[in-house]
Amino acid sequence: MSFFPFLQAASSSSTTGGLLHMVITFGLIFVVMYFLLFRPQSKEQKRREKLLASMKKGDKVITGSGIHGVISSVKEQTVIVKVDENTKIEFSRSAIATIVTDGAADGKEKKNEKAEAAAPSETASAAT
């Protein structure tokens, strides 16, 4: 008979330890979710708001649909983008995906030049 109270005491202490273990596990899951999902999303949102606020006349932009152009005027909610000599399109500010900087455009051109320079030598070596 004295054996049963001993089992009850042991089972109640393991329940408390199991509960503490479960709370710690959920806490760790929440911390991991915060650093993997919520924090990067808020950083990206702040970066995007800063990008949209910094648009000005003359900036080269790319829209979300892939249209390249130069901003000809900025309004409160919209932006007018010049895509050709006589073609201007009005977009919502949120439709602008990126502002192209000269350094980024030069970097892409340099990569294309390197790829083009490598391509003829590969075809020449394949022909011999």
Image (tube, rainbow, N blue to C red):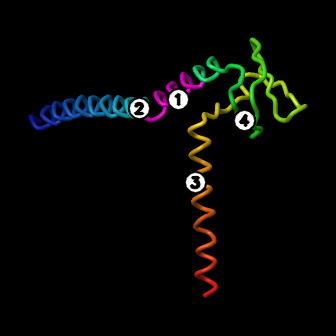
Indicate the quadrant containing the C terminus: top left, top right, bottom left or bottom right.
bottom right
Residue furthest out toward the top? 76
Proximity of marks 4 and 2: CB atoms separated by less than 8 Å: no
Residue that badge 4 annotates = 64
Residue that badge 1 annotates = 41
Indicate the quadrant containing the N terminus: top left, top right, bottom left or bottom right.
top left
The foreground one among 78 and 2 is 78
Residue that badge 2 annotates = 35
Of badges 3 and 2, the one in the foreground is 3
Residue 27 percent across, percent down from the top left = 35, 28
Of badges 4 and 2, the one in the foreground is 4
Residue type at mark 3 is Lys
CA–CA distance between discs 3 and 2? 34 Å
Proximity of marks 1 and 2: CB atoms separated by less than 8 Å: no
Residue that badge 3 annotates = 111
Read off the magenta span: 35-48
Residue 41 on the magenta span: yes
> Could you tell me which residue is drawn at 40 percent across and 30 percent down?
30
